[in-house]
Amino acid sequence: MDLSSPGTVKSIREKYGLQLSKSLGQNFITDRNILEKIIEGACVEDGDMVIEIGPGIGVLTAELAERAAFVTAVEIDGRLIPILKETLSEYDNIRIINQDILKTDLGQIIEESRQAGRFTGKVHIIGNLPYYITTPIIMKLLEEQVPADSITVMMQKEVADRIKSAPGSRTYGAISVAVQYFCRVTKVTDVPKEAFVPRPKVESTVLNLEPLDAKAIELKDEKVFMRCIKAGFAQRRKTLLNSLASAGGMDKDKVKRILAAAGIDPGRRAETLTVEEFGRIANETADE
């Protein structure tokens, strides 16, 4: 069964009477070239484990099962579970979990699979993320420090552009700083609307996030770091002094002390700061 064929997708939908959910971002890849690029971008090899977020009808899942030692597919939509059991029936190295990824303990899943001897290599997280919860999913994976060697995810191109933006860019924002603190960000490929059934209204991009062994700065408190980032970008046109004071809930004299200690000009704007500079502000804030 060629799951990447538009005809196969159509027949499966008709057989099960499947009405696709826009809210869950159910658009299935039908371009084998894109599937190959995702797998190659993640560097999946024999002996590895893959956790796939949102397998849909199993198009990418089947390809991953051919390369990896074990695949755990986490699907929130219960209607897709019987379909996945049918489309992936020939594979004995796939586990399907009907669960919300935001409520799933991925660290426990990985440890249980390693202890059971299901894989001996690296761990990769791969997924076509629902556009409306792309950021919460990525931040969950990073903040919980899920023990994965790579995170390769497809998302709306606009979001991907923000994540990989450099300081000074108009698309550089809080998500850029947060992700780049945790990871090295690499673009894998752009994905046109024509690569999906049904076609989404926007273009997509696949990014590879590789967790950093050595971060730009050691933080005293990651929560304070996240608060400083959000406050800094809450009102982009304001200076750091004003944005940290108003959105950060601190009086200006305190903000001035913090910025002076961090060696940051209070007249700068958040979009000009590097990850390391935000880290210095956070560490000085934590000491106040």
Image (spheres, helix red, strand yellow):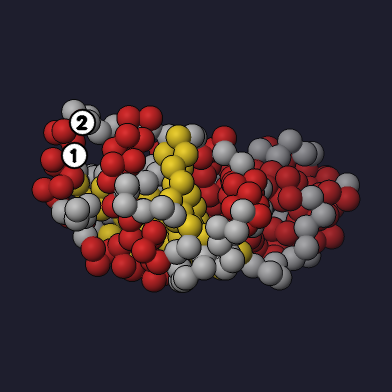
Residue at image point 23% right, 45% down: 201
Residue 66 - label: none
Whole-percent x and y of residue 71?
46, 54
Say left or right for 53 vs 238: left
What secondary structure is marked by label 1?
helix
Q: Point out residue 182 in the picture as x, y percentages from the top left corner.
A: 63, 60
For residue 174, side relative to residue 31 (left or right): right
Residue at point 27% right, 46% down? 87
Identify the disc placed on residue 16.
2
In the rendered structure, are the residues bearing label 1 and label 2 in contact, judged by CB atoms less than 8 Å apart? yes
Q: Is residue 211 visible?
A: yes
The answer to which of 108 and 153 lies nearer the viewer is 108
What residue is rendered at 57% in x and 35% in y? 103
Crowd tier of the residue under label 1, counting other residues whose Cα lies within 10 Å: few below 14, some 14–19, many 20 or above: some
Q: Position of residue 286 (x, y in %)?
A: 83, 49
Judging from the image, what secondary structure is the residue with disc 2 in?
helix
